Every structure is written in C-alpha cells, then in structure tokens.
Image (spheres, grey):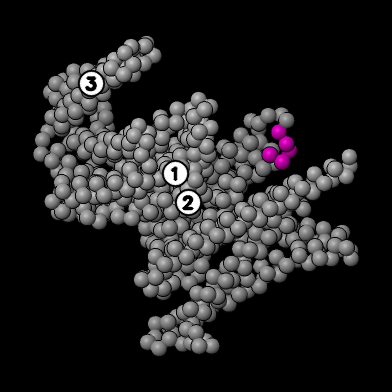
C-alpha cells in the first residue's frame, strides 16, 4: 500500500509539472527549476521532521516559529561571536556544554536517590557518563583557549548554538508530552506562540541579517552551486549499475529468474545512462574553487568547488538522450505486437467485452497525444492574443480558461490510459511485458529530458542536505529497531507498551528528531533569504511540512510514513505554489488552487484505497465460497 501511495503522489507531481510546462514553457527553464529544486529541498527537510512526530500519532505545530527563533539567534550569535577570537568562543562553548552535562548527571543521581532510594549499576551508567563528559569539557576549556583557530570556528560555533537551541526545544516538547502527559497539539501550539514572541523580544522586533560578509562562505551552504542535474544523474546511474549487479549476481540461488533478469536490465540501462551523462566530461574539465577557505588541514585549503566545462560539451548529454526515442518506439511496437497476438488468440463471443476493454487504452492514448499536439500549437498560435488587451473568447469562455481546462483534461486522459495499460496489458504479458514496460519508460523519460533544459539546471547545496537527511531518516525509520518501534507505537501505543517498548523514550526521540530537522531547515531558510523578520520568518511553514507529510502517504492517525513520499509531497507543494502564476491564474487564487489540488489528490487516493480493499474482500469471499463448494 505504501508503494502505491508513493506512485500515486509521483504521478500527481508529473501531471502538474507537465501541464504547467505545456501552458508556459518558462516553467522548465533552468532558473525556475533551480528555484523549485532548492525551495523543495528545504521544505522537504522540515517535512521529514514532521513525519517523525506524525508517525507516533502526534503533531508539531511549532515548526514555523522554531525556524524563526533559530534564524534570529543564528544572526545575533554570529555577529556577537565574531567580536572575539575563535579560541575564546571555543573555550566558552566547551564550558557551557560541560556545565550542562555535569548538571544533568548530578540531577539524575539525585533523582535516583530521592525517588528510588537506591542506585543500581544499570541506572548509574548514564549519570556517570554525563559527569565524566562534562568534566572533560571543563578540563579542556583552558587548553583550547590558549590555541589559535581560523574564524570559521566561530561561524561553526554559531551554527552549533542554533542546533543546540533546537535540540533543547525538542527535548522540552518530549518531556512535557511524556512526563506530564500533555497533548502534543497543546504543547506545540503553545510553542508556536512562545517562540514567535521570544523571537520578537530578543530582537526588539528588528530585522536581522548577514549583509554581504558571508556571501562567499557561510551562505554557500544554502546558495552554493556545486554541480548540475547531469552530475547527479551520473551518480544515480552508477548506483543503478551496482544495484543491478547485486540483483543479478550476488543473490541467493533460489531467487526467481525474473529478479535476475531485471538485474541485468538495470545494469544495461545504467550503462546507457552513464554513457549519456558522462559525455559532458569527455572534453575534460577544470576544477574551480570559490568562496572562503572552509578548513585548513595539513597546509591544504578546502573550499566549495564546481567543474568548469567547455561550452560545446554542456548540451551533449541532451543530444545523446534525444536518440532514445527510437528504442522507446521499438519497445512500444513490440509491446503492442504482443498484445495484438494475445487479442487474436482470445477473440471469441464470450470474451468480446474484455477485448474491447483492452483496446480502449490505446485509442484514448492516441486521442490524448493528438489533442495535446494540437493544443500546444494552439497555445503558440494564440500567444499574441493573450498579450492583447481584448482577450478572444470561445463559446463565451476566454481562450486562457479553455486552454488551461483542455490541457489538464487531456493530460488526465493520457495518464489514465497509461495506468490502464500498465494495469491490464502488463500482467498478461508476464515477465517479458514488465521488462518491456520498464525499458520503454526509461527511454521515454530520457527523451523528455532531452527536450528540456533540466540537464543544465544547477543543483544547489540544500539538495545534498536533503539527500543526506532523507537517506538517514529512511534507514532509521525502515531498517532500525527504534524506527520500527515508532511505527508500532503509532499503530497501537497500548499494544507497543505491553510488548515491552519504552513508549515515552520513543516519543522523546521523535520530537527531538523533529526539532533537529526544524533547526537544519531554519538555518538553511535564514541563509537563503539573508535576512530574518522576527514577526513573520517561518510563518505557516509547519502547515507546509504537515501537508507534505500527509500528501506523501503519512496517516495523521500514526503508524505509517514514507520519506520518499514526503520529499515528493514537498515538491508538489512548491510546484503548486509556482504554477498558478505561470499559467495565468490570479495570485489571490494561488492558495485556493493548492488546497483544491491537495483535496482532489487525497480524495482520489482514498477512493482508490477503498476500491482495492473492496476487491480484496470480494476475492477472499469468492475463494471461501469455492472452498465451501469443494468441501
């Protein structure tokens, strides 16, 4: 069910993007795609944080105010710390950390003495660790204060203090929810108001900013441009080849032949993608370093970098990918031929209805393609009329509205026909059909990419923060014991508690991770905007995060969540925010459009889920009836 939800939300993203690109080709320009990718990455990071709270059947409404507070404190701490040497700042930070660890250790020991009146060897371990760690930090403070460091250490301390605040706010949320048994809604709603008021108080309601002093250093963490989509695709192709080799060679002997066949297919497709994406670097490249030095290690300076390429090599991957239309057509012809062969074998009076049902998708697909082709020509031909003062009408309706409605309806028909072909045709053809479907889809995507400027789009550094955080979150949620505990607790907290899971500890962990993701997002949002308005920075961001999580397949009842789905959901939110302006809808209707599309997507997803559940029930009842008749 989770994979079906992810596929559905991915199709919704493709649907909205293609429709917007048809109506206005500025949507697929590198600058717009770069902005969408950067903003989607930052919103996806806070969406991942929202998932951690939602899977425990909780919620966090304070994310936006936390982002504002983190942004204000980052700016203020950075300006304050840069007035002192880095060594003094480092020694002060170690003392702060040391005294806190010593205090926590002492409080834990006192609590065990007063509440339990005994100290066991198992319970004394953590307090001792806290005491020793705090003592070590306090002892190292004078020594590190006598050394010399680069100013980057002060910048790192300011960032660490922002994460330090996020960690403690998440800890406070967890303690209030678990130890005082307060509702997450109430706790985080109070946090929303408290953090916003605190931000305005500590800044005296004055806008905070960084100026231009950090444009070539710290701000590159949000606006840096290390590579393009082509390089990311090259790395993905290498991973695809490695996955195919593992699937085809390093698998158990009892694995089905289908898995091995797909493994070899992944290797072949990955090698083709490597050939196309690596063509940009065939003429050589030049390593270009920019920005201030990040680290000086053994006499070597490490900076942000990018690759400088010859101009004639930049468009080469798209030129090679354009040839993928031929294998895509060939695979489609073979697939249609197999289906015609099946039709010829199954033509009979008893199966005539099924025969026409299988013929409908191809007819609808041809109609949709022809309609979209005519629609694109109509849009190009009427571009002058759109710019004129008096807009033309068609049957009393403006041409702009006709074009928008026509494109969306034709794309809906196209998507429905593709899904019907996948649902009806592919299972009939068996393994060969699935292999052909995968190959056709792969080459079709390559051909579509070659018709856009996507391969020349710059990927900025927030994407790599998202990649790292998303990978760790997916592994944590799906491959670790603690992640399974969170999901189990969201499904049934009482059952999880009776099975031996420390539900209080899991809830605290969930809200800690949520706040830490909010802290990372707050730092990136602040560096991206280069200024912080205490009264408005981060407002409503928690709603975007929750909406991205719900769109991505997370249930507000808890127990279900997909990191990939959240990333796709966050991208949809940003595309929907950008699309109305692109297609000529009034800015005042932007939020209305987002709400309607999200509502329609959720209704369709819920309807599909109910239909699938109904079919499962009918299938089980038929099988039970057959068993009874056999008996």
Q: Nearer the viewer, residue 529 or 188?
A: 188
The residues tagged by marks 3 and 1 sit, at their Cα atoms, a distance apart of 33 Å
The quadrant holding residue 221 is top left
Mark 3 or 2, nearer chain start:
3
Note whether residue 336 is visible.
yes
Mark 2 or 1, nearer chain start:
1
Identify the residue position indicated by label 2 in the image.
550
Identify the residue position indicated by label 1 in the image.
54
Query: Compared to 592, does 156 lie above or below?
Result: above
Residue 347, image x, y percentages:
87, 63
Do the residues bearing badges 3 and 1 touch, measured as CB atoms within 8 Å? Answer: no
Disc 1 crowd rating (10 Å Cα; few below 14, some 14-19, many 20+) is: many
- Residue in view at x 33 percent, y 36 percent: 176
- Residue in view at x 43 percent, y 58 percent: 573
Q: Is residue 324 magenta?
A: no
Residue 413, image x, y percentages:
62, 68
Disc 3 crowd rating (10 Å Cα; few below 14, some 14-19, many 20+) is: many
Query: Compared to 393, does 442 lie above or below?
Result: above
- Residue in view at x 76 percent, y 52 percent: 429
Which residues, given as a range, are shown in magenta? 255-259
Q: Nearer the viewer, residue 107 or 306?
A: 107
The residues tagged by marks 2 and 1 sit, at their Cα atoms, a distance apart of 9 Å
Q: Disc number at residue 102?
A: 3
| Left or right: 207 in relation to 367 | left
Do the residues bearing badges 2 and 1 touch, measured as CB atoms within 8 Å? Answer: yes
Secondary structure beneath dot 2 equals helix
Residue 340, image x, y percentages:
80, 62
Residue 56, image x, y percentages:
46, 39
């Amino acid at each position: 069910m989770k994979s079906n939800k992810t596929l559905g939300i991915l199709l919704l993203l493709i649907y909205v993007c293609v429709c917007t690109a048809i109506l206005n080709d500025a949507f697929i320009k590198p600058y717009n795609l770069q902005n969408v990718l950067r903003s989607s990455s930052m919103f996806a990071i806070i969406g991942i944080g929202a998932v951690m709270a939602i899977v425990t059947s909780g919620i966090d409404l304070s994310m936006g105010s936390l982002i504002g507070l983190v942004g204000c404190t980052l700016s203020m701490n950075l300006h304050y710390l840069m007035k002192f040497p880095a060594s003094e700042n480092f020694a002060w930070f170690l003392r702060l950390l040391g005294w806190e660890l010593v205090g926590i250790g002492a409080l834990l020991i006192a609590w065990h003495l007063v509440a339990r009146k005994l100290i066991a060897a198992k319970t004394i371990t953590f307090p001792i660790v806290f005491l020793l760690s705090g003592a070590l930090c306090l002892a190292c403070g004078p020594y590190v204060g006598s050394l010399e460091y680069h100013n980057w250490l002060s910048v790192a301390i300011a960032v660490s203090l922002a994460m330090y605040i996020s960690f403690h706010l998440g800890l406070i949320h967890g303690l209030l929810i678990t130890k005082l048994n307060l509702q997450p809604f109430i706790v985080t709603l109070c946090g929303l108001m408290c953090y916003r008021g605190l931000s305005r108080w500590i800044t005296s309601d004055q806008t905070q900013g960084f100026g231009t002093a950090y444009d070539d250093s710290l701000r590159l963490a949000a606006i840096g441009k290390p590579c393009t989509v082509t390089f990311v695709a090259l790395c993905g192709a290498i991973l695809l080849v490695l996955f195919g080799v593992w699937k085809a060679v390093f698998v158990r002997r009892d694995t089905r032949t289908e898995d091995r066949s797909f493994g070899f297919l992944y290797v072949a497709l990955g090698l083709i993608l490597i050939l196309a994406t690596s063509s940009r670097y065939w003429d050589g490249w030049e390593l270009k370093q920019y920005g201030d030095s990040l680290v000086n290690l053994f006499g070597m300076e490490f900076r942000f970098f990018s690759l400088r390429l010859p101009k004639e090599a930049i468009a080469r991957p798209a030129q090679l990918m354009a040839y993928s239309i031929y294998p895509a057509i060939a695979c489609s012809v073979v697939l249609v031929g197999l289906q015609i062969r099946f039709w010829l074998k199954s033509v009979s009076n008893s199966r005539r209805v099924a025969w026409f049902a299988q013929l409908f998708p191809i007819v609808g697909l041809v109609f949709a393609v022809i309609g979209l082709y005519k629609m694109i020509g109509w849009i190009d031909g009427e571009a002058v009329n759109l710019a004129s003062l008096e807009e033309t009408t068609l049957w009393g309706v403006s041409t702009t509205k006709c074009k928008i409605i026509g494109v969306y309806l034709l794309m809906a028909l196209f998507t429905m026909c593709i899904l019907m072909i996948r649902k009806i045709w592919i299972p009939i053809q068996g393994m060969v059909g699935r292999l052909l479907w995968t190959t056709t889809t792969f080459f079709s995507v390559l051909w579509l990419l070659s018709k856009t400027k996507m391969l020349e789009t710059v990927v900025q550094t927030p994407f790599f923060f998202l990649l790292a955080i998303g990978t760790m979150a997916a592994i944590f949620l799906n491959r670790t014991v603690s992640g399974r505990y969170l999901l189990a607790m969201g499904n049934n907290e009482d059952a999880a508690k009776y099975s031996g899971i420390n539900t209080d500890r899991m809830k605290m962990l969930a809200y800690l991770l949520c706040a830490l993701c909010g802290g990372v997002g707050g730092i990136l949002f602040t560096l991206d905007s280069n200024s912080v308005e205490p009264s408005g920075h981060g407002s409503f961001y928690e709603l975007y995060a929750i909406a991205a999580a719900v769109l991505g397949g997370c249930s507000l009842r808890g127990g279900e969540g997909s990191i990939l789905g959240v990333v796709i959901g966050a991208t949809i939110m940003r595309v929907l925010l950008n699309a109305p302006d692109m297609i000529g809808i009034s800015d005042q209707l932007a939020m209305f459009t987002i709400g309607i599309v999200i509502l329609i997507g959720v209704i369709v997803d819920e309807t599909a889920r109910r239909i699938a559940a109904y079919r499962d029930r009918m299938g089980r009842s038929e099988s039970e009836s057959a068993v009874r008749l056999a008996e």
